[in-house]
Image (tube, rainbow, N blue to C red):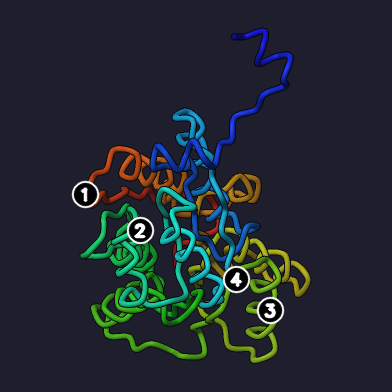
């Protein structure tokens, strides 16, 4: 038989095999961008565990385009994927949830109706704010991503609650939305420099954004941290190189646990712990 197979150069029709077995051994991962450190780290954790278990991973980048995202949900419905892990989403959950009829969907943020792996953004942000407030800071700014996202809402809620505890209001001129890249961080610092109205500390939306602020601060001769303290998020290698105080959300672990829920057909909610990494970009006032 082996000789006949070799002589005929027989190849399995894998789509047919998968159709018979009712599985594709392919997992879809919905992300907005492929070049953002946070999503790279989460996807890295997913892929590591997926490959250990003989699964292929299809990275479904959407650029937060709702129609593009629906294409990948339709792939699940058509049984072209065995499941989906959603790292970040453009459509609301009311649109996404019906697709669970066609296969497992795992969320990387807290969702009551789905198995999920998530950092507690409110608790994390409160902890960071408590730290800078204890350092004497009262004029606090922060950068966020999409203002309507779940994580941004949680961070804003924590921000408002923390400032209220020290009888401070939120200064809208120190809240910067749509910050994702180093260039965004540069622009934040540039805007502050032009206005001449600086907070004493800024909580960045990622280490890349923080790095952009540090780079632009050097351009204008602004000393970090004595004139402006900065905290990043993600604890990427870049943060270590810059000696940047940051928050480790254990993003790779999020990816690993998300695959664990998918692979083992678990309906659980797993909260990922965080760690404040204290380096040298926050001063005491």
Q: Is residue 215 left or right of residue 257?
A: right
Q: Quadrant of residue 4?
A: top right
Label 2, label 1: how many angstroms apart (C-alpha)?
11 Å
Crowdedness of circle 4 by 10 Å Cα count: few (<14), some, many (20+)? some
Q: Tell me the number on the disc at residue 187.
A: 3
What SS does tag 3 mark? helix
Marks 2 and 3, the one that precedes in the sequence: 2
Marks 1 and 4, the one that precedes in the sequence: 4
Residue 215 coordinates in the image, percent (x, y): 72, 65
Tag nearer the camera, 1 or 3: 1
Q: Give 153 or 14, whichever is nearer the viewer.
A: 14
Q: Quadrant of residue 60?
A: bottom right
The residue where tag 2 is placed is 107
Q: Is residue 244 left or right of residue 79?
A: right
Q: Give 226 or 67, whichever is nearer the viewer.
A: 67
Residue 139 coordinates in the image, percent (x, y): 44, 80
Marks 4 and 3, the one that precedes in the sequence: 4
The residue where tag 4 is placed is 63
């Amino acid at each position: 038989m082996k000789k006949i197979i070799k002589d005929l150069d027989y190849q399995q029709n894998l789509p047919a095999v998968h159709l018979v077995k009712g599985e594709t051994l392919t997992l879809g991962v919905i992300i907005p961008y492929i070049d953002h450190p946070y999503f790279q780290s989460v996807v890295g954790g997913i892929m590591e565990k997926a490959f250990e278990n003989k699964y292929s991973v299809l990275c479904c980048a959407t650029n937060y385009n709702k129609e593009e995202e629906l294409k990948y949900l339709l792939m699940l419905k058509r049984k072209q994927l065995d499941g989906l892990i959603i790292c970040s989403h453009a459509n609301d959950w009311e649109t996404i949830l019906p697709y669970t009829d066609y296969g497992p969907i795992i969320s990387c943020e807290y969702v009551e109706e789905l198995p999920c792996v998530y950092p507690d953004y409110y608790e994390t942000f409160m902890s960071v704010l408590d730290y800078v407030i204890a350092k004497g800071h009262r004029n606090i700014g922060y950068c966020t991503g999409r203002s309507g996202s779940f994580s941004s809402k949680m961070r804003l809620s924590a921000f408002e609650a923390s400032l209220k505890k020290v009888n401070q209001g939120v200064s809208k001129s120190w809240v910067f939305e749509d910050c994702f890249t180093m260039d965004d961080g540069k622009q934040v610092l540039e805007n502050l420099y032009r206005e001449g109205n600086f907070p004493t500390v800024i909580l960045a939306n990622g280490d890349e954004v923080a790095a952009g602020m540090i780079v632009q601060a050097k351009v204008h001769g602004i000393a970090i941290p004595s004139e402006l303290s900065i905290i990043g998020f993600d604890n990427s290698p870049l943060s270590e190189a810059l000696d940047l105080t940051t928050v480790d959300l254990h993003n790779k672990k999020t990816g690993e646990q998300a695959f664990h829920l998918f692979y083992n057909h678990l309906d659980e909610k797993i909260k990922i712990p965080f760690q404040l990494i204290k380096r040298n970009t926050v001063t005491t006032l």
